[in-house]
Image: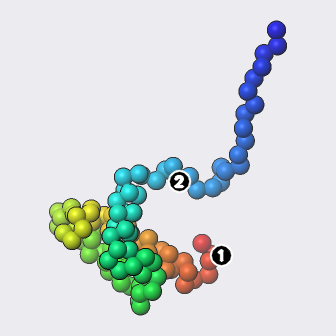
């Protein structure tokens, strides 16, 4: 009797980013920060801020220093300070990326 085997699928994604590595709780908290910000300031307002890189760097530092002072959650939003810092650093990266040669990334 002939053995029938399943064909193994192929997908050439070995060199692509593996988004399954992203920690889901942290990503959700960052999304919470972004949602609060969109409601407070407007969607994508962060792209329009004058001196955005400097200001988001400073914002990330304020949240990180709050963590070092043993303050876990932002008093205004109730969301973890680290999530606020990550959101600010994401804005920093994005602003840096669009302000420089994108091919050098």
Q: Name the residue at 49% across, 80% down.
A: 95
Q: Name the residue at 35% across, 80% down.
A: 41
Question: Could you say where residue 73 lies in the image, as x and y percent from the top left?
Answer: 22, 63
Q: Earlier in the sequence, mark 1 or mark 2?
A: 2
Q: Which residue is mark 2?
A: 19
- In the rendered image, is residue 12 in sight? yes
Question: Could you say where residue 7 lies in the image, as x and y percent from the top left?
Answer: 75, 31
Q: Quadrant of residue 26?
A: bottom left
- Name the element at disc 1: helix
Asked if 63 appears above or below 8 in the picture, the reply is below
Query: How is colour applied across the structure in the image?
Result: rainbow
Residue ranking furthest to the top: 1
Mark 1 to mark 2 CA distance (whole Å): 22 Å
Answer whether labels 1 and 2 touch (C-beta < 8 Å).
no
- In the rendered image, is residue 68 in sight? no
Q: Which residue is mark 1?
A: 103
Q: Quadrant of residue 60?
A: bottom left
Q: Name the residue at 49% across, 50% down.
A: 21
Asked if 98 appears above or below 15 in the picture, the reply is below
- Name the element at disc 2: helix
Q: Residues within 10 Å of mark 2 (few under 14, many from 20)?
A: few
Q: Quadrant of residue 55?
A: bottom left
Q: Name the residue at 26% across, 75% down.
A: 62
Question: Could you say where residue 105 lies in the image, as x and y percent from the top left?
Answer: 60, 72
Q: Is residue 43 left or right of residue 103?
A: left
Of 103 and 43, the residue lying toward us = 43
Question: Could you say where residue 9 lies in the image, as x and y percent from the top left?
Answer: 72, 38
* Quadrant position of the N terminus in the picture: top right
């Amino acid at each position: 009797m002939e053995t029938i085997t399943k064909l193994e699928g192929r997908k050439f994604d070995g060199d692509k980013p593996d988004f399954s590595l992203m920690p889901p709780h942290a990503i959700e908290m960052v999304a919470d920060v972004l949602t609060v910000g969109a409601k407070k300031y407007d969607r994508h307002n962060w792209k329009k801020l004058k001196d955005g890189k400097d200001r988001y760097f400073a914002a990330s530092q304020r949240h990180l220093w709050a963590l070092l002072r043993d303050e876990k959650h932002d008093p205004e939003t109730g969301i973890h300070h680290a999530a606020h810092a990550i959101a600010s650093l994401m804005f920093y990266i994005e602003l840096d990326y669009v302000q420089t040669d994108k091919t050098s990334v």
